[in-house]
Image: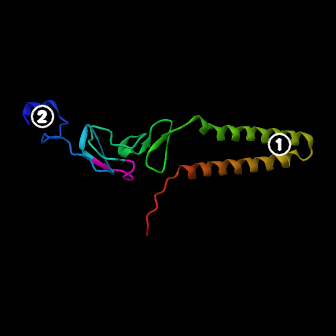
Amino acid sequence: TSRVFCESHLDDMDCEHAPPELKAGFWSHSSQPLSVFKCKNELQCIGGKPTGSICASGREGRSCGFCMPNHFSNSLGQCTKCGDYDAIPAVVAMILLLLAIGVLGWQMGRKISKSSKQVISATIIGTQAGVMIQTLGVFSDLSLVWEEP
């Protein structure tokens, strides 16, 4: 291969200065092909030329560690685009929360003498429910890869 050809085609694999092809499980940026990073697993980084697409479908960033906007990680290492149906649980939860607040307000208005105890109880229950929802949200975002002992 001629020197002139190689100077004009920097990513040509026949030229001695061409960037090496990455194995699955490794990532590098096209501007620094010799600066290689290990990926979380081989499913996220599929390998190939650093000038091409080396991340699994829907993934981006260093070591293919992030999902593209409006995508979520699945068990195959890819990121799947969110659908409209993904908002339904949040809408149902909001409706139930508003309904619970309305019932609580109605109950508190009926029994004036016990309202201070009800307010304290409602506050404790509400904060505990909030902590539980946050904890479940964190657990749902975890993705653990268990290895055999």
How crowded pointer 1 is (Cα within 10 Å; few <14, some 14-19, many 20+) is rated as: some
Which residue is nearer to you in this view: 133 or 143? 143
Q: How is the image coloured?
A: rainbow
Which quarter of the picture shows residue 112? top right
Which residue is pictured at 89% across the width and 39% down the height? Answer: 109
Task: Give the residue pinned by disc 2.
Answer: 6
Which quarter of the picture shows residue 101? top right
Q: Is residue 12 left or right of residue 29?
A: left
Q: Secondary structure at mark 2?
A: helix
Provide residue 133's location: percent of width, then percent of height. Answer: 65, 48
Question: Residue lying farthest bottom?
Answer: 149
What residue type is disc 2 on?
Answer: Cys
Which residue is pictured at 46% across the width and 58% down the height? Answer: 145
Which residue is pictured at 36% across the width and 43% down the height? Answer: 55
| Predominant SS of the magenta segment | loop
Task: Give the residue pinned by disc 1.
Answer: 104
Residue 107 in magenta? no
What residue type is disc 1 on?
Answer: Leu
Q: Which residues are magenta?
A: 36-44
Provide residue 115's location: percent of width, then percent of height. Answer: 87, 45
Among numbered discs 2 and 1, the one appearing first in the sequence: 2
Which quarter of the picture shows residue 106? top right
* Residue 54 drawn above or below residue 9: below
